[in-house]
Image (cartoon, grey):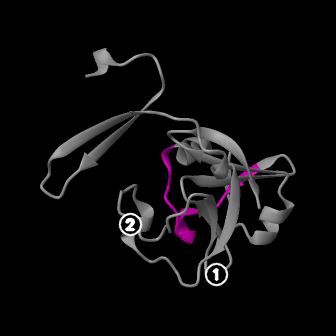
């Protein structure tokens, strides 16, 4: 299968079905729609206390569908994540990301940046978001990119 592909960037999705069967989907990695570079804030009304919150899965009832990027704030007032990645704030030259305990996916790229000492975990609030010098999203497919809040 891979020998037939050109040199474009691709996304490989591996699915594990209830039966134990694996399936693979390969698609060209399209540019991120511009609607995902401007995010809207979404205040959660109740806590997301689901095991699906902490694992990468196609079952994501805690993430509402939207054609725009969303930045979630927990019912406790803490910054969580976006609809497609982890959030990182640059504040006075230091990079911060929320801890997993606020109910987020411990993303692969997020974990890598923490292990490299480039990002520090810290409880973040809407005020931190408003005062941040830069707002970034990271995930293992897209890497690190900057967003704006609308």
Residue range highlighted in magenta: 95-108
> In which quadrant is the N terminus drawn?
top left
Secondary structure under the numbered disc 2 in the rendered image: helix
Is residue 116 visible in the rendered image? The answer is no
| Closer-to-camera residue (97/28) | 28
Q: Between 54 and 41, which is closer to the camera in this rendering?
A: 41
* Residue 6 at x, y percent in the picture: 41, 16
Residue at the image point whose x is 85% and y is 51% from the top: 133
Inspect this view and state whether residue 44 appears: yes
- Circle 1 is placed at which residue position? 76
Quarter of the picture containing the C terminus is bottom right
**Mark 1 secondary-structure assignment:** loop
Q: Residue at x 58, y 84 (%)?
A: 45
Callouts 1 and 2 close, C-beta under 8 Å = no
Q: Please report whichever mark, 1 or 2, sits nearer to the chain's N-terminal start.
A: 2
Q: Which residue is mark 2?
A: 52
Marking on residue 133: none
Residue at 50% x, 39% y is 141
Viewer-closest of 18 and 89:
18
Query: Is residue 37 shown in magenta?
Result: no
Q: Decide if residue 28 is on the left or right side of residue 119.
A: left
Residue drawn at (57%, 70%), measured in percent from left and top? 102
């Amino acid at each position: 299968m891979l020998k037939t592909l050109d040199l474009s960037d691709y996304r490989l999705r591996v699915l594990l079905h209830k039966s134990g069967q694996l399936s693979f989907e390969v698609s060209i990695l399209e540019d991120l729609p511009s609607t995902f570079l401007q995010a809207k804030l979404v205040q959660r009304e109740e806590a997301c206390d689901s095991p699906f919150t902490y694992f990468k899965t196609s079952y994501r009832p805690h993430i509402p569908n939207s054609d725009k990027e969303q930045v979630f704030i927990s019912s406790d007032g803490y910054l969580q994540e976006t609809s497609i990645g982890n959030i990182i704030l640059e504040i006075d030259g230091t990079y911060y990301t929320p801890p997993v305990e606020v109910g987020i996916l411990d993303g692969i790229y997020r974990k890598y940046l923490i292990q490299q000492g480039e990002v520090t975990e810290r409880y973040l609030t809407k005020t931190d978001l408003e005062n941040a010098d830069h707002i970034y999203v990271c995930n293992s497919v897209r890497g690190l990119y900057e967003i704006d809040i609308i």
